[in-house]
Image (spheres, rainbow, N blue to C red):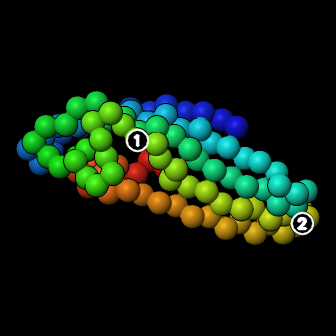
């Protein structure tokens, strides 16, 4: 398990925005060759003016629980690793055309 916190501030398109993101990266070994990975976090918009950032579907002014990535890693030996991963980027968390940090 590891944790991170990031903030972003910016302006453009006639508006300003700022948000914080607390992310917890979890890894759990289900069976000796199989591991589950999960990112679970809390997205919190601080400020938004003049743009649609923070006003997307599923977003509230108080923040929201997010799980942008999960997957399974199968490693039967040191020479073979198969990883299956699902990544979800919500439109409300990609402000002003920027890319999602995770």
Q: Residues within 10 Å of mark 2 (few under 14, many from 20)?
A: few
* Circle 2: element type: strand
* Circle 1: element type: strand
Q: Say which residue appears at 75% left-offset and 69% top-offset.
A: 82
* Residue 86 left/right relative to 80: left
Against 6, is 31 above or below?
below
Q: Say which residue appears at 56% left-offset and 55% top-offset.
A: 69
Q: CA distance from mark 2 to mark 1?
A: 37 Å
- Badge number at residue 93: none
Q: Say which residue appears at 61% left-offset and 57% top-offset.
A: 70
Contact between marks 2 and 1 (CB within 8 A): the answer is no
* Residue 66 left/right relative to 95: right
In front of the other: label 2 or label 1?
Answer: 1
Picture coordinates of residue 92 (x, y %)?
Answer: 30, 51
Residue 94 visible? The answer is no
Q: Say which residue appears at 67% left-offset and 67% top-offset.
A: 84
Picture coordinates of residue 7 (x, y %)?
Answer: 38, 32
- Badge number at residue 64: 1
Picture coordinates of residue 51 (x, y %)?
Answer: 14, 46
Residue 1 visible? The answer is yes
Quarter of the image where one finds residue 8: top left
For the N terminus, give its image quadrant. Answer: top right
Against 51, is 82 above or below?
below
Picture coordinates of residue 14 (x, y %)?
Answer: 8, 44
Report the residue marked by disc 2: 76
Quarter of the image where one finds residue 49: top left
Please report whichever mark, 2 or 1, sits nearer to the chain's N-terminal start.
1
* Residue 96 left/right relative to 102: left
* Residue 30 left/right relative to 41: right
Q: Residues within 10 Å of mark 1 (few under 14, many from 20)?
A: some
Number of numbered discs on residues: 2
């Amino acid at each position: 398990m590891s944790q991170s916190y990031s903030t972003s501030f910016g302006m453009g398109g006639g508006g300003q925005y700022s948000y914080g993101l607390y992310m917890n990266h979890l890894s759990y070994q289900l069976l000796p060759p199989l591991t589950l990975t999960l990112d679970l976090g809390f997205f919190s918009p601080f400020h938004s003016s003049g743009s649609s950032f923070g006003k997307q579907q599923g977003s509230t002014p108080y923040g929201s629980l997010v799980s942008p990535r999960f997957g399974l890693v199968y490693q039967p030996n040191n020479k073979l690793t198969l990883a299956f991963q699902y990544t979800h980027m919500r439109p409300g968390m990609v402000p002003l055309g920027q890319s999602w940090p995770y």
